[in-house]
Amino acid sequence: MSSLIWEVLVGFLHALAEHVPQQVALAAGSQGDSQAAVAWVSGPLTGNEEPNEGNGSIPEWRYSFGAAPELYGNYTSGRIHRVVAQGLVANSEYKYTLRGDPATVKRRFRTLPSSAAPEPPAAGAVTDARFPFALGVIGDLGQTADSQDTIRHLDADPLIRLVLHAGDMSYADTDQKRWDSYGLTVEPLASHLQWMVCPGNHEIESDYYTGDNFVAYEARFAMPAVQQPKTSPSQEQMGCKHPYPTTPHSGRDCTPSAFTGHYDWGNSFYAFDAGPARVISLNSYTYTHPSSEQYNWLKEELEALAHRRSQTPWLIIMMHCPFYNSNAAHQAEGQASLMRDFHGFEDLFYKHKAAVVINGHVHAYERTHPVYQNASQDGAPTYLCVGDGGNREGHAKTYLEQPQWSAFRDGLSFGHGRLVIENISHMRWEWFRNDPTQSDLVDQANAIRRARQLANAGASTVTVESGWYQPLKARPVDDSVWILNPYKHQEPGPPQRSPMNTSLVIIGVVSAVAVALVSAIAVVHRCRRRRAEPHAECVESSAEMGSAR
């Protein structure tokens, strides 16, 4: 082969590699039943950093970031692309191809169920195809072996249609190459299942030179933005550092646990319809006072939802910082206290009958009873802290004395959650805990089969050396409860599924005992009054009691 032909061939292969999609991630649009977005990264871009049309019709851009020079230095991303598909059919499977995909790659995803309740026919009720609807729930994921187990468990669950991730994704902590490795880590699942995120403190990542915040988070995700993002640099964050493992250093921390800056719209806060639910994602680290853009948008969003609540009966809130937390970690942090107690966010959640509020931040799991203003109260939201996804910083093991509003907590395990919306009035919450003593959920043969499927769908990191080819241990359900919809919990009742909520089981047992006692009294009474034929009367009544058990 001549040197010229070789140079042409190498140049051609290099050009192909430059366009191969990586870090592919899906997201729901504001109308999840008819809209979907996909974001991905390809090879490095030359030219300015503003969005442009590239070589085709798909906008592409890059971002630059400056970390402390003695730590990670300067970084420029590859090409970042976003596409939003509209006019899709609810609950339908779509195949899609990205520019640069090899011919062998077969990508697909499914739209979310319809947001509209079915019209009942004249003859009576009709089955509502929106139910059941299952959502995977995680927080504080990271890129450890435990993180990958969490991703694989979400992938192995055939019910899950959507992932809600309550902040702290990559734990890049200003090392921007870790955003690239994170994108590859979650791609096997994120490329075929809508994955919705909110900003955590590890997404703040202040630029060492400019004090700009949330740069990578805004650039890399394609959440259903209401408006273009508005940001202002934090001058006090200039010169920040975040070495890992954490060591003493001069200057501020680049991912401060307690922080308030200016980052509105874009991926900062947004809302979308997910089947029978409206999901609202908030930013704990931007302004939240009653004259702030986030507060006023939230108030308008909730008031608009109130006018169509019969069509969208469930309200789910997601944000990083918990309002209710009995762990010693992240106690009484300023931004969370302001949002809840002084800026009125808890009042809005309660007034508009949010069913659950999903949080991360604390590296542990905790579920509250329905709670409002520090007291258990029927009709209030249930708070779910799921900061146990698998991150490299480990567990928050120390708890304070358990308050009366705290129902269940575990600071020693990684895991994930699942919300199953069963009907307009009942949702099932389950928390799954890592347990290496369990039997295999996915055996070797099925692990290999699934890994090959994902590789054929474009997941480049699913190689023979990856964990995807290994068996996966089951995660037991350690916490499980029925959650009543504060908006409409009178009807219908919960489906008869197992395991049941303890309180419902107790009610059922008490009711059964009461019926049995009444029936037994009636039997004795009849037997005493009709002594001439006691055997027939008592046998008949006993049979009736037995059939009722």
Image (cartoon, grey):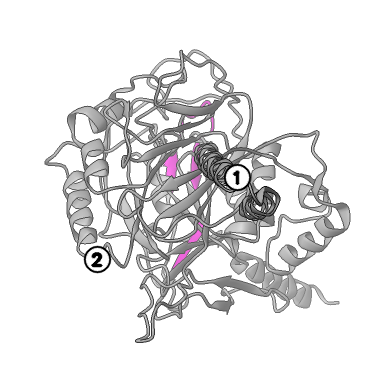
| C-alpha separation, residue under disc 1 versus residue under disc 2 | 58 Å
Q: At x 32% / y 59%, what residue is drawn?
A: 225
| Label 2 crowd (10 A; few <14 / some 14-19 / many >=20) | few
Q: Position of residue 519 (x, y in %)?
A: 55, 45
Which is closer to the viewer, label 1 or label 2?
Answer: 1
Q: Name the residue carrying label 2.
A: 308
Depicted 236 relative to depicted 201: above or below = above
Depicted 81 relative to depicted 246: above or below = below
Q: Is residue 177 visible?
A: no
Task: Answer with mark 1 or mark 2, whichever residue precedes in sequence.
Answer: 2
Q: Could you tell whether 70 is left or right of 316 in the image? A: right
Depicted 359 relative to depicted 158: above or below = above
Q: In the image shown, does 287 or 314 lie closer to the viewer?
A: 314
Name the residue type under label 1: Cys
Q: Position of residue 142 (x, y in %)?
A: 58, 38
SS of the residue under disc 2: loop
Q: Position of residue 291 (x, y in %)?
A: 11, 41
Q: In the image shown, does 520 or 154 lie closer to the viewer?
A: 520
Q: Is residue 32 visible?
A: yes
Q: Which mark is residue 483?
A: none
Q: At x 44% / y 79%, what residue is drawn?
A: 88
Which residues are drawn in magenta?
A: 64-82
Q: In the image shown, does 499 or 359 lie closer to the viewer?
A: 499
